[in-house]
Amino acid sequence: MSSLFEEEKSPDDIRTPLADRMRPRHFNEVIGQTHLLGSDGPLRLFYERGEFPSILLWGPPGVGKTTLAYLVAKEAGYSFSRLSAIEAGVKEVRELIAKAQHRQSQGKKTLMFIDEIHRFNKNQQDALLHAVETGIITLFGATTENPSFEVNAALLSRCQVYRLHSLSESEVREVLDRAIQTDTLLKTLDIEITDWDLLVSLSAGDARTALNALELAVSFARKPNSSKIKISRPILEKALQQKTAQYDKKGENHYDTVSAFIKSMRGSDPDASIFWLAKMLEAGEDARFIARRMVIFASEDIGNADPFALSLAVSAFQAVELIGMPECRINLAQTVTYLASCSKSNASYVAIEDALSEIRNGSDTTVPLNLRNAPTRLMKQEGYGDGYQYPHAFDNHFVDVHYFPEKMPVKVFYRPGFFGKEKSFRERLEFLWPKRYK
């Protein structure tokens, strides 16, 4: 058990790690999470009122969960107690609750911060219920896992859940810039960073990782009796003992790699596909960008040859949103290998492009009366829906009629392939429309 108030050290103590020296001391110093801390954000509004509900903070490491709990306690006048779910059990929880109850009798409020609360079992979580419900404590729980799955329903219903997001690239750079300009040690040095993209991407949206990388790189690049420090790609790789792929997310190498990734899947090579996926992930590419590309690919290059591909790609995108890096790399790998291995068809993609071209070239788009909807009596009197033949009333649930505009000749836009599910589609359409599909 510990208190951040007891642990807090002076930001001027250069023996303290840079990430601790740069920990925000006030709400206004927090970078990112504007959806919670902006002028209309819930934490900002609670802060202005001076009262906070019990809250579960859900998000990846290094985005400020612990810091926010500390700032709430500090600026709203709560006594702060901290537990780690890895180390504490029911006994420690009850001891802290007893102390909080004593403070309450003296008119003092207690904020209990539990790190990695998802690691508490049901009994440990249940031990918090009465204290949370009666206001003995204000609970702030931090979790990297979805609380809906990891926190029991009774405790979950007594807390507000707020999701914290990984910092954007611009926010990570703002964190680093602030450190260089304001930190007790770094501001005395002449620091030049020649590979901002690499330094930012290595952090993967984690401010603590970014600051640790900067601090380590400075120590490697610093020369005796000189304040000038140049942080380049080789310095970062040497300091972090990590070879990095050449990858500029806004440059040619980015687009070349994405192209190789897509073309490898299109070429049904799962091994090359997984290689390019690994390069993008290792270089810090946004997993959501990769997942979006796979959703597009599933329809553009696979389509009805394997309709399940789209469902899997969408599921992968949802998994990325739900889980985040680094775990979601496994979901991406499963999906990439499936998309690369299954049957391919671009027939759906070609069909919509051809149909759009037909319309843009001035083709008649008037809907025939027999195909129009007739929800009112007047529409029925005007002949809307007249002559429509209901396919289910015929053999094979099919009737040979003209579904195009009256003056437009039949055109074939969709040409199913000969593989996967599309093979059966082609056989059925050839049977139903023999003149069209010769």
Image (cartoon, rainbow, N blue to C red):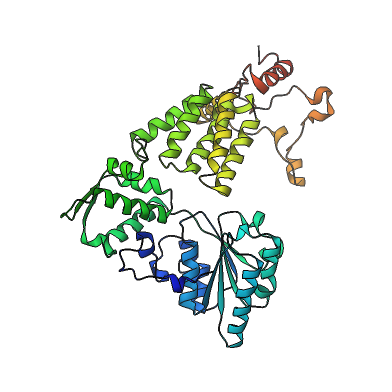
Closer to the camera in the image, 126 or 149: 126
**Residue located 66% across and 16% down the image:** 436
Judge whether 111 appears above or below 347 on screen.
Answer: below
The furthest residue to the left: 225
The furthest residue to the bottom: 106
User: Which of the image's four quarters has the N terminus?
Assistant: bottom right
Judge whether 25 appears above or below 331 on screen.
Answer: below
Q: In which quarter of the image is residue 225?
A: bottom left
Judge from the rendering whether residue 366 lies leftward or rightward of residue 8; answer left or right. right
Q: Can residue 21 be seen in this view?
A: yes
**Residue located 35% across and 58% down the image:** 175
* Number of on-image labels: 0
Q: Is residue 361 visible?
A: no
Q: Where is residue 109 in the image (x, y as percent from the top left)?
A: 56, 80
The furthest residue to the top: 438
Q: Quadrant of residue 144?
A: bottom right
